[in-house]
Image: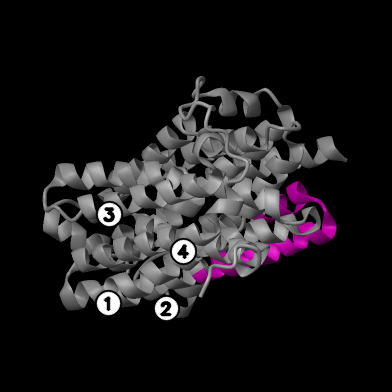
Amino acid sequence: MPHNDGNLGVSPTFLVLALLAGHTMASMSTLVLPAVAPAVARDYGFDPSLIGYQISLVSLGMVVSLTLLGNTSRRLGACRTNQFGHGMVGIGMLIMLVPWTPFLIMGSLVVGVGYGALTPSASYLLVRFTPAARRNFVFSLHQVGIPLGGVVAALAAPAITVLAGWRWAVMLSAVLIFGVIVLMQRGRRKWDDDRDPASPAITANPLAGASAIWGHHSLRLVAIAGCCFSWVQFCTAAFAVVACVEALGMSLLLAGTVLTVVQVSSAVARVFVGWLVDRVHETACVLAWTAAVMMLASLAALALSPALPLPAVYVLFAVLGGVSGCWPGAILAEVGRLAPQGQVSLAISGSLVITNVGKFTGPIVLANVYALTRDYGLAFASLAIPSAIALYCLVVAHRRRT
């Protein structure tokens, strides 16, 4: 059957579904190790709380990609850049299969470099091919791939680990990632029809995007808020399983269900917040209320102990997952709205550099809070600080707009 390049293969619906599938599989890759952190720690002989450093290595790779490869979508095309990112994620997962700590470090960095290329290229495609009236919803729907991938990791990785070992979970993730590359090829000709082969692939000024964001007051406030949301989000996802196993005495499989609750609530919250922002047209106001709830939920984590009933554990992590994970689509759409004409891709890349500071810093800080206190309740309560900063920035941004 001949390929129909004018219908399904390049329709906005197929584009959104393909990008959603890609984001889901890539997100699964970044969360496989946190989902089975106690088993990985046993293999390597380190404390499970050090999984925070592994997720920070992924975030560091993302920052490298966002600062150096921000112009790749212009040179190769956004679809080909997206495929390149998925390829790097898959290769990074294969590197981590080698049973030696330096390869765990190297693979985490490679995964991060690949993952960092995904959101700018996908956002570029969504801005080009989706109607402006539905952009907040579409961006939020696309970002659902992150918690959806977390759900797949939380359900599949512990089960595979118990049956066959954690490296088989990593292998499955790599295979699914390479499948996405094949899927994206279907619409590549149309999606990359604006590429400029003469454009340099490496960004001449690696910090141009972040500098552009920092020089624009409203964009700076939104980006800092995104950094703080990202801080709480990645800490919640990275440490949910470890805290439930180490502090609450759960089995790996039961702790995986808690991580599933985190990711499902995050997915639902992303779509709801995207819909709500499109209805009320006040991104900063909606996210300010979310940040306030996030701060209270972080403080509620002081109650974490073996005496806490299981339903209460689920509720606590559901709230933390929802409020800390609802932000990406709304904030990326807001950055796209506020960005100067012709600088959407640069602004999004710059905002992601700043938000990834939270992804890199947060897990390390939480791991060290735990190392000092040996109390996961206090460690999670420390997330009230970035929550308060996000609340302040969003209140100021809302006041400036009104």
Q: Give SS at disc 3.
A: helix
**Residue at image coords 51%, 20%:** 205
Q: Position of residue 293 (x, y in %)?
A: 64, 58
In three-dimensional space, the C-alpha distance between marks 1 and 2, rounded to whole angstroms, equals 20 Å
Q: First in sequence: mark 4 or mark 2?
A: 4
Q: Nearer the viewer, mark 1 or mark 2?
A: 1
Q: Position of residue 68 (x, y in %)?
A: 45, 29
Q: First in sequence: mark 3 or mark 2?
A: 3
Decide: is 260 above or below 44.
Answer: below
Magenta stretch bounds = 264-290
CB-based contact (under 8 Å), mark 4 and mark 1: no
At label 3, counting other C-alpha atoms closer than 10 Å, the crowd grade (few under 14, some 14-19, many 20 or more) is many
According to the picture, the residue beneath numbered tag 4 turns out to be 183
According to the picture, the residue beneath numbered tag 3 turns out to be 93
At label 4, counting other C-alpha atoms closer than 10 Å, the crowd grade (few under 14, some 14-19, many 20 or more) is some
Q: Nearer the viewer, mark 3 or mark 2?
A: 3
Q: Give SS at disc 1.
A: helix
**Residue at image coords 54%, 67%:** 3
Is residue 333 covered in magenta?
Answer: no
Disc 2 marks which amino acid? Leu
According to the picture, the residue beneath numbered tag 1 turns out to be 159
Q: Is residue 375 in view from this perspective?
A: yes
Q: Nearer the viewer, mark 1 or mark 3?
A: 3
Is 269 on the left-hand or right-hand side of 149? Answer: right
Res. 310 mark: 2
Q: First in sequence: mark 3 or mark 4?
A: 3
Disc 3 marks which amino acid? Met
**Residue at image coords 39%, 75%:** 257
Disc 4 marks which amino acid? Leu
Q: Nearer the viewer, mark 4 or mark 2?
A: 4
